[in-house]
Image (cartoon, rainbow, N blue to C red):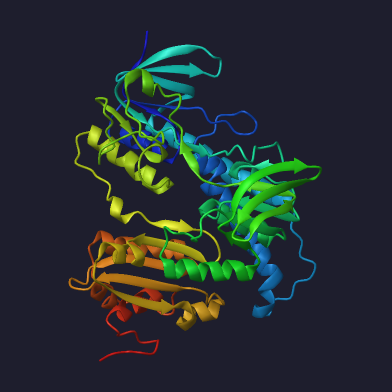
Amino acid sequence: MAEQYDVVVIGGGPAGYVAAIRCAQLGLKTACVDAWCDAAGKPSLGGTCLNVGCIPSKALLESSAWYDKAQNEFTHHGIQIKGVKMDVPAMQARKEQVVRDLTQGIKALFSANKVSLHHGTARLLNNSQVEFTGKDNKTSVMLATHIILATGSSPINIPIAPLTDNMIVDSSGALAFDDVPKTLGIIGAGVIGLELGSVWRRLGAKVTILEATDSFLPMADEQLAKEALKHYTKQGMDIQLGARVEGAAVKGKQVEVSYQDKQGPQQIKVDKLVVAVGRKPNTKDIGAEQLGLKLDGRGFVEVDDYCRTNLPNVYAIGDIVRGPMLAHKGSEEGVMVAERIAGYKARVNYDNIPSVIYTEPELAWVGKTEQELKQAGVKYKSGVFPFAASGRARAAGDINGMIKVLADAETDRILGVHMLGAHCSELIACGVIAREMMASSEDLAMTMFAHPTLSEALHEAALAVAGHAIHIAGRKK
């Protein structure tokens, strides 16, 4: 006999597992179906983010940053180290342990909150029935009053660069290299390409990034994107814009990559090639066509502001719906849907989703960019403060970058906060809170910040909106 649940969540990534836990906290009988397995074939919750995305990439970024600092920066602090070496297998083992700790932590949270975990795949039979297929290939039916789709996304593969076992890889493969390639090619200068390029560049690889478009990070504020490009180039990453890849193939022990740029046909040879051209929603096998679940032209599930689909009592969240493919966005959607199912009037403020690129320096932002405001004809004021003028940044030796605050010319309400520099992934939360509280630049300017801290740069940028910054020239009365 099929078991009845209040909620069945399909997918155990940051959107799905958070939704399942919150549903259970609210007293709803909840099941979560997840198919992810680790390298050993064991169930591993957390989806792409915890297994082959956010967490392992940040673990490698952290390890490679320490190595890079030991090689190039410790001497500036009076620390003399000779013969520093990177043990790549040990670095990878640490990464895997971080992943295991966190995925096991989710499993423990499921147990503590009495979420029923089912390891396998699932598809919709109708808006109240889910067909579950376990790892033994046996099928059963789960009954649900509400269903939440959270099946996540996968790397986009391109026919011109077919993946191989070891030499042409996607982002998952690039996180698992067992040694440092002498030369590394990356197709795509987006968030994933830049972060992976940073990891292996720090460890000694010569990195070439081929980006088909002529603009660099068009989703970021143009001023900060241009500044970031200067730093990445200075560090040794060869980022070629307007380079459209036409083919890639393994030839012997290298990969030959052919591409077109403004000078015409070009070719490079690399030891390994990473395809990082974006991700696609995992909606192919959820039963959408049979039930008439509406998808858009790119395969995303169509939802309203509250993540409701066109099918009654069926919701979709995370990477399979509109908006940026970000773990924190999916998690907040999971909380919202759980609370709305339970009768609360929850919502997600899609105007205040922070974005971060975990390179060095880090690039982070929330709200509107300067180019967006110009295109929309919005009158605004801008305040910029460089980290080079920050006492804490000077003491730490992290003086690259700046913070920019954009505010409405009439109301002074903060329209956007943009950051390039050390620890900006943490500092951007101040900008998110300011926008969530509908603060003005004057509100930030009148707020006392501890000294010496990097966050003082945000304070000074807010002061600079009115021309009142203390620690840079050009102060007005």
Which residue is rendered at x = 45% and y = 69% of the image?
Answer: 224
Q: In this view, does 418 lie above or below 251?
A: below
| x and y percentages locating residue 273 in the rendered image | 67, 47
| x and y percentages locating residue 4 in the rendered image | 32, 17
> Foreground: 241 or 98?
241
Residue 12 visible at all = yes
Looking at the rendered image, the quarter that the C terminus falls into is bottom left
Horizontal placement of 308 versus 398: left or right? left
View extreme (top): residue: 1
> Foreground: 128 or 235?
235
Horizontal placement of 398 versus 67: left or right? left
Q: Which image quadrant for residue 78?
A: bottom right
Which residue is rendered at x = 32% and y = 28% of the image?
Answer: 294
| x and y percentages locating residue 240 in the rendered image | 60, 60
| x and y percentages locating residue 315 in the rendered image | 31, 31
Q: Which image quadrant for residue 7?
A: top left
View extreme (bottom): residue: 477
Looking at the rendered image, the quarter that the N terminus falls into is top left
Horizontal placement of 77 versus 138: left or right? right
**Number of numbered callouts drawn:** 0
Horizontal placement of 237 versus 470: left or right? right
Which residue is rendered at x = 54% and y = 45% of the image?
Answer: 53
Q: In this view, does 413 lie above or below 148?
A: below
